Amino acid sequence: GAVVSQHPSRVICKSGTSVKIECRSLDFQATTMFWYRQFPKQSLMLMATSNEGSKATYEQGVEKDKFLINHASLTLSTLTVTSAHPEDSSFYICSARNRLAGRKEEQFFGPGTRLTVL
Amino acid sequence: DAKTTQPPSMDCAEGRAANLPCNHSTISGNEYVYWYRQIHSQGPQYIIHGLKNNETNEMASLIITEDRKSSTLILPHATLRDTAVYYCIVSPGKAAGNKLTFGGGTRVLVKP
């Protein structure tokens, strides 16, 4: 089956530092990956669409200079939270869609990365 | 994307069928109905999706009404591991860049 991994699974950092989160599709190629954020007891909120070889598309209200997205290959997208602050503490989840999925529309989600900013 | 309405929570008995309703009265003709679930502190898991016809796979069945304004996800024999938040999402798929907009979902608790 299609597997998406994220690294790290948990990260604790000091306020003001930057944190990079990786999202990998392990057994398929993904031209498009998505990044979500989930606060405690809330639903997932789409932050941005990561497109291989081009700039990411950010949802309204998401600062592109704060959440840097790079999708350098068909199997890897990274999200960098720059100058992190305590309010950025959240559960970050990526998803990917198999570029060869054809009519199949499902996305596969990673296990998530829990970021805690002190 | 059309919005969906789901009950915030429901309990079901282990071994029994769980029927999860979803209303999507403003669904457009090109929008699919997707179901995902999220077990605590994990990423969402795809369950099933459909457009007009009822669908069945190894996990669940999806029943879509003829007018497509509502649907029901059926877990045929619920187990304790089915305890999760279940999200019903409508989206035109590729036409919307394959974006998924998550609502509040239904928190399902399977009890022994």
Image: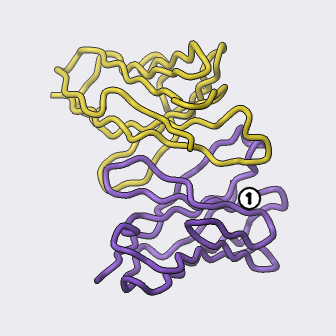
Q: Position of residue B72 (x, y in %)?
A: 62, 77
**Residue visible at 71% across and 72% down in the picture:** B25
Rendered purple, the chain in question is: B
Identify which amino acid the numbered label 1 is placed on: Tyr
Lateral position of residue A50 relative to residue A15, left or right: right
Report the chain holding disc 1: B
- The image shows residue A18, relative to residue A100, as above or below, that is above
Q: Which residue is mark 1?
A: B32
Q: Give SS at disc 1.
A: strand
Q: Position of residue A49 (x, y in %)?
A: 59, 30
Which quadrant is the N terminus of chain A positioned in?
A: top right
Give the color scheme: rainbow, by chain, secondary structure or one colour.
by chain
Q: Position of residue A12 (x, y in %)?
A: 19, 27
Judging depth in this view, the residue of B14 and A95 nearest the camera is: B14
Q: Position of residue B21 (x, y in %)?
A: 57, 78
**Residue visible at 57% across and 12% down in the picture:** A72
Rendered yellow, the chain in question is: A
**Residue visible at 56% across and 22% down in the picture:** A75
Q: Quadrant of residue B94?
A: top right
Judging depth in this view, the residue of B84 and B91 nearest the camera is: B84
**Residue visible at 66% across and 25% down in the picture:** A31
- The local crowd at label 1, few if under 14, some if 14 to 19, many if 20 or more residues have their Cα within 10 Å, is some
Count of number-bearing discs: 1
